[in-house]
Image: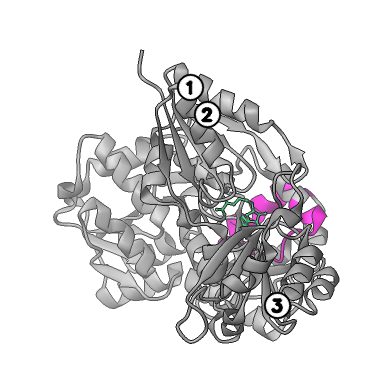
Amino acid sequence: MKQGIVYLVGAGPGDPGLITLRGRDCLRRADAVVYDYLANPCLLEEARADVEKIYVGKERGRHHLPQEQINELLAELAQAGKTVVRLKGGDPYLFGRGGEEALFLHRAGVEFEVVPGVTAAFAAAAYAGIPLTHRDYTTTLGLVTGHEKPEKKMSSLDWGKIATGMGTLVFYMGMVNLSLIVRELIRNGRSPQTPVAIVRWASTAQQHSLIATLEDVEEKARAASIGPPAVIIVGEVVDLHKRLAWFENRPLFGRRVLSTRAAAQASGLRDLLEERGAEVVSVPTIALAPPADWGPVDRELDRLAQTDLLILTSVNAVDFFFERLRSKGSDARALAGVTLVSVGPKTAEAFEPYGVKADLVAADYRAEGVVALLKEQGVQGRRVLYPHAELARTLIPDELRALGAEVAAPVLYRTVVPQEGGETLRELLVKGALDAVTFTASSTVDHFVAMVGEDAAQLLRGVVVVSIGPLTSRTARKHGIEVTVEPRDSTLDAMVEALAQHFKTHPTSPVRD
Ligand code: SAH
């Protein structure tokens, strides 16, 4: 039997990008992942599809599995020969009982490794703009738990030393005992004017930082009803927040934005939104499917030697075309004499992985741009191949034929309504959990309505509706949906920028659960 092992892996504080490369490697290799509430569940996507996922809770006051049973579970899984990842929020050896788990494994003779992680204090410092040390302020730092073992009294901490022994103090699990912490620090010599920051859900879209002094922090925390999970940072360095906060100042910070793009295309939009601070919820309204009959495309693939121009107007079209070519045992060399035409830079880029470059790139992102470009070039007597999405407009073949070209326009792929996601969408809308909804093509609107139901337009009232361009907006209006934001250029970049501008000029408070 394979020798089992337990990796105690620090998941980082919330932003999934903050796990270490080593941690991610362990996740990819795992047979079982045992995780709790502070580890971002989207990290589980790194694991194999058939991985055993075991949630053991640990939300404050709601322990799903007692620690002793977690320890035993880890040992049992490893003893059954499994590669186990124990995924823990932040760093495994800071206030996370990782030490207890390691000791148990050591006693049980189970092999283990520990992968450190970005702890909450460090994430809060970075993402709230509070350097924990700074030569002009302090060079010492203390990490303290504000919540010891239940059977111990808080007062077992040596407050005399803690209060004045260190410049910066960061309290974990301190929200419940906030008043005790404040009282003891002041009583033991810390000035009531000492700056304090409470940073909740550091490094996530829900991050909230509250700046106060020891004197008024309790009152302010109560007024803002700020609860766990949060770290309390005490010390003069907190003043630097005013100048160094960057995360919460991003234009879409705290906004929850829906992406309706197909799963394969969602990441580009997601990146653009996340770079500006938005939390992205992705519910694809588009699934792609091959044509009902490959015959028309295949016949054209056999005639590429006689074809003058190939027009592909979307990333999907490029992918479907080259995949089909490959599945027929051919490759890019079959296109040697063919002029490749694309629309916009994204589609042009999509050619590159297949080892070819677009010869002509229409600047206008719509079919009109392709027609204008080819009109300039002249297509009289040319053989043009335009494989396209089912239900695409017929503008390109119509106009090119009028210009004297011979045009073959087979259906290359179909967009269909996905089987799943409708209920999730409805729930998000009914709960009012979205700040904005983005539509990047007419079909995303049609499918959205098909998935949500008749009352989609009504449910979208009060939500910022973003459309990539005039055609998509027209489709939205056809369904009675009011479009709030439409960029001048029909690109993802321009769309996201226009959304950011909208929230700048219409600063409503973000939705919160
Ligand atoms: N091992 C973890 C700490 C676990 S104890 C680490 O290294 O970060 C749980 C406490 O960590 C919470 O009560 C809170 O004080 C803190 N914490 C964890 N994640 C946090 C986050 N994203 N933002 C603020 N505090 C967090």
- Find disc 3 in the rendering and name its residue: 189
Q: Secondary structure at mark 3?
A: loop
Residue at 54 percent of width and 78 percent of height? 246
Q: Position of residue 384 (x, y in %)?
A: 29, 57
Q: Position of residue 230 (x, y in %)?
A: 68, 61
**Crowd band around label 2 with a 10 angstrom C-alpha radius: few (<14), some (14–19), many (20+):** some
> For residue 378, what is the image quadrant?
bottom left
Q: Earlier in the sequence, mark 1 or mark 3?
A: 1
Under mark 3, the amino acid is Gly
Q: Is residue 161 left or right of residue 425?
A: left
Q: Earlier in the sequence, mark 3 or mark 2?
A: 2
Q: Secondary structure at mark 2?
A: helix
Spatial separation of the CA atoms under disc 1 and disc 2: 6 Å
**Label 1 with label 2: CB-CB less than 8 Å:** yes
- Find disc 1 in the rendering and name its residue: 108
Look at discs 3 and 2 and give the one toward the viewer: 3
- Find disc 2 in the rendering and name its residue: 104
Q: Position of residue 370 (x, y in %)?
A: 37, 69
Q: Is mark 1 within 8 Å of ligand 1?
A: no
Q: Position of residue 37 (x, y in %)?
A: 65, 44
Q: Nearer the viewer, residue 151 or 482?
A: 151
**Label 1 with label 3: CB-CB less than 8 Å:** no
Q: Which residues are magenta?
A: 428-453
**Label 3 with label 2: CB-CB less than 8 Å:** no
Q: Secondary structure at mark 1?
A: helix
Spatial separation of the CA atoms under disc 3 and disc 2: 40 Å
